[in-house]
Image (spheres, grey):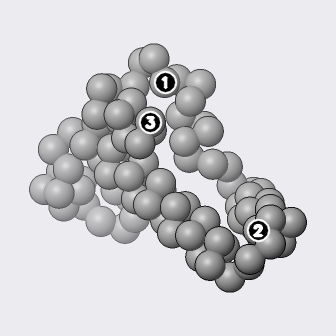
Amino acid sequence: MASELKITKAALHYHFASKSELGEALVTRYATRFAEALAATESQFEDAPSQLEAYVGLYLSVLRKKRMCLCGMLSADYRTLPGPMQDAVLR
């Protein structure tokens, strides 16, 4: 992962002592951004059909970039994730 981010492994481990800590931070960041996107959707559109359309649009934008929902991907391995990551997925 460090090479993909164009940083050294030492720099990565300076901020995250373990894979579990890194995973928890990634899940928390993803969930926070998604919650903010949902809140923005709710504040932009008053009626339920428009909110639902915008909500679906969030998922479509991810799929069009050939990406997947992080928490969805992790759910298949939920039972084997470290405890802090499990907790972050459930928040």
- Residue 91: quadrant of the picture: top left
Amino acid marked by disc 2:
Gln
Residue at the spot of label 1: 78
Between the C-alphas of marks 1 and 3, the distance is 10 Å
Q: Label 2, on which residue?
A: 51
> Mark 1 vs mark 3: which is more N-terminal?
1
Secondary element at tag 3: helix
The location of residue 52, given as percent across then percent down, is 80, 62
Instruction: Give x and y (percent) for residue 70.
Output: 56, 46
- How far apart are labels 1 and 2 at the CA level? 30 Å
Does residue 61 sit above or below 82 in this rendering?
Answer: below
Q: Which residue in the rendered view is the most extreme toward the front?
A: 47
The residue carrying mark 3 is 90
Q: Which percent across, then down, holds residue 58?
A: 72, 65
Label 1 is placed on what type of residue?
A: Tyr
Q: Toward the viewer: 1 or 68?
A: 68
Q: Residue furthest top?
A: 79
Label 2, label 3: how far apart the Cα atoms are: 24 Å
Residue 10 visible in this rendered orientation of the protein = no
Residue 61's x, y, as percent?
Answer: 75, 67
Q: Nearer the viewer, residue 24 or 14?
A: 24
